[in-house]
């Protein structure tokens, strides 16, 4: 079955750009929405945005000015960049899949998550 | 943006008891497009329920979902030891942003 795996630096300095990649295995990246979701330590879940395999995107307005999500279909990967980070961006970052049909946008499966700490 | 409010924040119950978790929406969730997830410490959330009442693949039938409009419920008929966890609801009924509730922790009494 499809599996997702996040990768990237676990420590980012304030004001710099957080960069993560999600590798999709066991299936094609085509024909689905691929999302990033984050969870600050001890807190709830926040959807960051998604990308379709064609490259179209949709971002949470609360983060839109700082977020870029891109896709590399040749590598079955998609990536997240979050600029100008602060301590408030410290979180476990998950990648997840949802069906690219309106009304079918639950998240399944999820990656295992990766903790990113923003600190100097 | 639809805001989801889950109650209670914490539910203290014993194994074998029935758990009833609530998720209220700030506006109607179209077509009952609501999901429930279970999260255990250190793990990613796991999909339990989608479309308010459909169980995901491999989810035991002691988990059931109900509701429509602005009021939704997740029921665990008889708590097993592995069910003690945090549960989140998520709406996908409107255009993004898709949103989550703040979670309900089901703990052992």
Image (cartoon, helix red, strand yellow):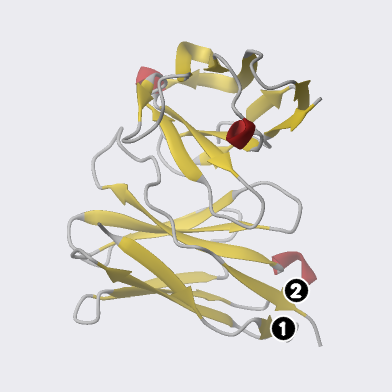
Residue annotated with mark 1: A15
- On the image, numbered disc 2 is attached to which residue? A86
- Residue drawn at x 55%, y 16% is B75
Residue drawn at x 27%, y 69% as measured from the top left: A25
Picture quadrant of residue A106: top left
Discs 1 and 2 carry the same chain letter: yes
First-in-chain label (1 vs 2): 1
Q: Quadrant of the image for the N terminus of chain A?
A: bottom left
In front: B79, or A88?
B79
Q: Is residue A86 left or right of residue B1?
A: right
Q: Residue at x 68, y 37 (%)?
A: B102
What whole-number distance in Å separates the C-alpha atoms at marks 1 and 2?
6 Å
Count residues near mark 1 (Cα–Cα under 10 Å), then give few for <14, some for 14-19, many for 20+.
some
Q: Residue at x 39, y 31 (%)?
A: B59
Q: Position of residue B76 (x, y in %)?
A: 55, 19
Measured as percent of width and height from the top left, residue A12 is found at 68, 84
In contact (CB < 8 Å): disc 1 and disc 2? yes
Chain letter of disc 1 in the image: A
């Amino acid at each position: 079955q499809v599996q997702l795996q996040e990768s990237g630096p676990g420590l980012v300095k304030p004001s710099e750009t957080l960069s993560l990649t999600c590798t999709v295995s066991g299936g094609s990246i085509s024909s689905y929405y691929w999302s990033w979701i984050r969870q600050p330590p001890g807190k709830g879940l926040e959807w960051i945005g998604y990308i379709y395999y064609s490259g179209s995107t949709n971002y949470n307005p609360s983060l839109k000015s700082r977020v870029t999500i891109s896709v590399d279909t040749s590598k079955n990967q998609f990536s997240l960049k979050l600029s100008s980070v602060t301590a408030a961006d410290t979180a476990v970052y998950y990648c997840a899949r949802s069906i690219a049909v309106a009304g079918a946008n639950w998240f399944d499966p999820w990656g295992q998550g990766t903790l990113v700490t923003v600190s100097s | 943006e639809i805001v989801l409010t889950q109650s209670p924040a914490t539910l203290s119950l014993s194994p074998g008891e029935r758990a009833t978790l609530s998720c209220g929406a700030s506006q109607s969730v179209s077509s009952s497009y609501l999901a429930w997830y279970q999260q255990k410490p250190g793990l990613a959330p796991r999909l339990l329920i989608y479309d308010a009442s459909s169980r995901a693949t491999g989810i035991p039938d002691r988990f059931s979902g109900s509701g429509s409009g602005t009021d939704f419920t997740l029921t665990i008929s008889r708590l097993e030891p592995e069910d003690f966890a945090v549960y989140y609801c998520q709406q996908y009924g409107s255009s993004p942003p898709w949103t989550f509730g703040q979670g309900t922790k089901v703990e052992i009494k």
